[in-house]
Image (spheres, grey):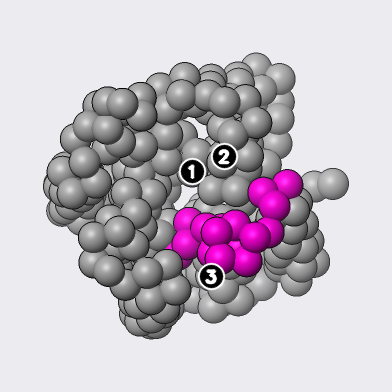
């Protein structure tokens, strides 16, 4: 199945040039005519993956911190974080272009909510990890199928309509929930320590990169598979740093680990907001 519908670089340049000269509107690879529109998500660079893993780690440690230290309980934390996420997503949807601060705040919050969804099913409702992993995987597949049937592309280079953005964030939510459930399942079944688990998931991501670069694995699927795997990778790193030495961690604690990673995330996001190194130009062809 083909997931990318693109136009040639020459056609893209001609269409964009025509729009700028007033000769007509630029056209995207989907064939729909409209004016210049900015992509609402960042370009996938090294910064993207670094901040994604850091946000995932914060999602793991922050969920544990709020649950254990704030005394809100798993349900209370879930309600609070879901409300915050909803508010930030409203702001995100109302922006007319990618804004690093708003976007990555949404990712950080959705990482917490995705973790809490999986934890609630396992801890409060007693749903086996095998079941939740399967359900989240099926839900993610359904999102991709409906997304592609409606938009004819799953490319993240063209998240420039409300519909595409809604599918994008729904997919992101399910990747976090799936990554949490699948990561916990693998760690429990294989009885891995935090450090070994982090190495295992890092190698899995490296294998996806090799499959894409050397074996021609589709770029869209490579991206989303790696996106899922960064969730258990970040969680393993967070647990290794925050858990006590008796449990196989370094004993930094959830507070120190969360504060450290949040500081790094903030620094990188400010850098990107100033330099705009991860901004996709308007009407970049789906490639």
* Residue 129 drawn above or below residue 164: above
How far apart in space, not on screen, are marks 3 and 2 (Cα)? 26 Å
User: Residue 150's x, y, as percent?
Assistant: 75, 71
Name the side, left or right, on which 235 lies relative to 209.
left
User: Residue 222's x, y, as percent?
Assistant: 63, 36
* Residue 68 drawn above or below residue 89: above
- Mark drawn on residue 95: none
Name the side, left or right, on which 251 lies relative to 53.
left
User: Residue 218's x, y, as percent?
Assistant: 70, 36
Neighbours of disc 3 within 10 Å: few (<14), some (14-19), many (20+): some
Neighbours of disc 1 within 10 Å: few (<14), some (14-19), many (20+): many
Q: Earlier in the sequence, mark 3 or mark 2?
A: 3
SS assignment at label 2: helix
Name the side, left or right, on which 126 lies relative to 236.
right
Which residues are the magenta region? 113-130
Which of the pair 175/282 is nearer the observer? 175
Mark 2–mark 1 contact, CB under 8 Å?
A: yes
Q: How many marks?
A: 3
* Residue 34 drawn above or below residue 146: below
User: Residue 239's x, y, as percent?
Assistant: 36, 37
Give the labeled residue for mark 3: 165
- Looking at the rendered image, the disc whose residue lies closer to the viewer, 3 or 2, is 2
Q: Is residue 114 in view from this perspective? A: no
Q: Earlier in the sequence, mark 3 or mark 1?
A: 3
SS assignment at label 1: helix
- Mark drawn on residue 231: 1
Give the labeled residue for mark 2: 183
């Amino acid at each position: 199945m083909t997931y990318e519908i693109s136009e040639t670089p020459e056609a893209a340049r001609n269409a964009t040039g025509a729009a700028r000269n007033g000769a007509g509107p630029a056209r995207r690879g989907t064939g729909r005519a409209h004016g210049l529109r900015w992509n609402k998500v960042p370009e996938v660079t090294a910064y993207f993956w670094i901040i994604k893993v850091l946000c995932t780690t914060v999602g793991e440690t922050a969920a544990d911190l709020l649950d254990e230290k704030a005394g809100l309980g798993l349900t209370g934390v879930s309600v609070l974080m879901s409300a915050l996420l909803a508010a930030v997503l409203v702001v995100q949807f109302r922006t007319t272009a990618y804004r690093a601060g708003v976007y990555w705040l949404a990712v950080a919050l959705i990482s917490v909510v995705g973790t809490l969804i999986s934890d609630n099913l396992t801890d409060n409702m007693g749903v086996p990890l095998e079941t939740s992993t399967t359900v989240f995987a099926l839900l993610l597949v359904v999102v991709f199928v409906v997304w592609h049937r409606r938009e004819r592309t799953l490319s993240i280079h063209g998240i420039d309509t409300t519909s595409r953005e809604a599918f994008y964030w729904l997919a992101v939510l399910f990747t976090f929930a799936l990554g949490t459930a699948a990561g916990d399942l693998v760690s429990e079944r294989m009885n891995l320590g935090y450090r070994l688990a982090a190495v295992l998931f890092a190698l899995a991501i490296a294998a996806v990169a090799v499959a894409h670069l050397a074996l021609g694995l589709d770029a869209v699927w490579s991206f989303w598979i790696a996106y899922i795997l960064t969730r258990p990778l970040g969680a393993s790193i967070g647990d290794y740093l925050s858990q006590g030495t008796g449990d196989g961690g370094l004993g930094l604690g959830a507070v120190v680990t969360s504060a450290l990673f949040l500081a790094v995330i903030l620094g990188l996001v400010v850098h990107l907001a100033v330099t705009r190194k991860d901004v996709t130009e308007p009407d970049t062809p789906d490639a």
